[in-house]
Image (tube, helix red, strand yellow):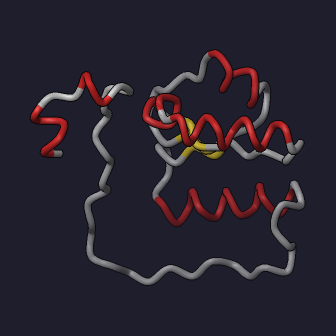
């Protein structure tokens, strides 16, 4: 389960989290937004679970920590090998804009984005 303000506001992401809870799936929280503090249903869902902090480590380290956590909770087959990363040129992370939930509240700028 991803933890960020955008995730919290997304109906699809909330449905995903609700489904995981209903199906009694093991959950590994992933912090994607610096200083984000979950509240409400997300706080209830993740409780006291340890999370992988993608804001604190460079991506290769964070993904390795995620795989270790997934292996430890038997979510991923323990035979999965270590992840190998190729050095790539820096790229920008695209974050979709936060839009009002009601389309009728969208402005011309929201539509252009």
Quadrant for the C terminus, please: top left
Quadrant for the N terminus, please: top right
Identified at 81% across, 37% down, the residue is 21
Which quarter of the figure has residue 106?
A: top left
Residue 36 in the image: above or below residue 74 = above
Q: Position of residue 51 (x, y in %)?
A: 68, 40
Identified at 27% across, 76% down, the residue is 89
Along the horizontal axis of the image, is 82 left or right of 70? left
Q: Position of residue 19 (x, y in %)?
A: 75, 42
The total number of labels drawn is: 0
Along the horizontal axis of the image, is 66 left or right of 32? right
Closest to the observer, 83 or 99? 99
Q: Position of residue 71 (x, y in %)?
A: 83, 63
Q: Residue furthest front?
A: 104
Identified at 78% across, 79% down, the residue is 80
Q: Residue furthest top?
A: 40
Identified at 62% across, 77% down, the residue is 83
Residue 95 in the image: above or below residue 109 = below
Closest to the observer, 105 or 56? 105
Q: Position of residue 43 (x, y in %)?
A: 68, 22
Closest to the observer, 31 or 62? 31
Closest to the observer, 73 or 43? 43
Which quarter of the figure has residue 15?
A: top right
Residue 55 in the image: above or below residue 82 = above
Along the horizontal axis of the image, is 21 left or right of 74? left
């Amino acid at each position: 389960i991803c933890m960020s303000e955008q995730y919290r506001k997304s109906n699809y992401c909330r449905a995903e989290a609700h489904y995981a809870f209903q199906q009694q799936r093991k959950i590994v929280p992933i912090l994607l937004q610096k200083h984000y503090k979950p509240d409400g249903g997300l706080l209830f869902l993740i409780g006291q679970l340890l999370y992988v902090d993608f804001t604190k480590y460079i991506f290769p380290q964070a993904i390795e920590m995620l795989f270790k956590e997934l292996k430890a909770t038997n979510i991923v087959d323990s035979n999965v090998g270590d992840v190998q990363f190729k050095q790539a040129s820096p790229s920008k992370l695209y974050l979709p804009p936060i839009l009002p939930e009601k389309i009728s509240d969208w402005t011309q700028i929201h539509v252009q984005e």
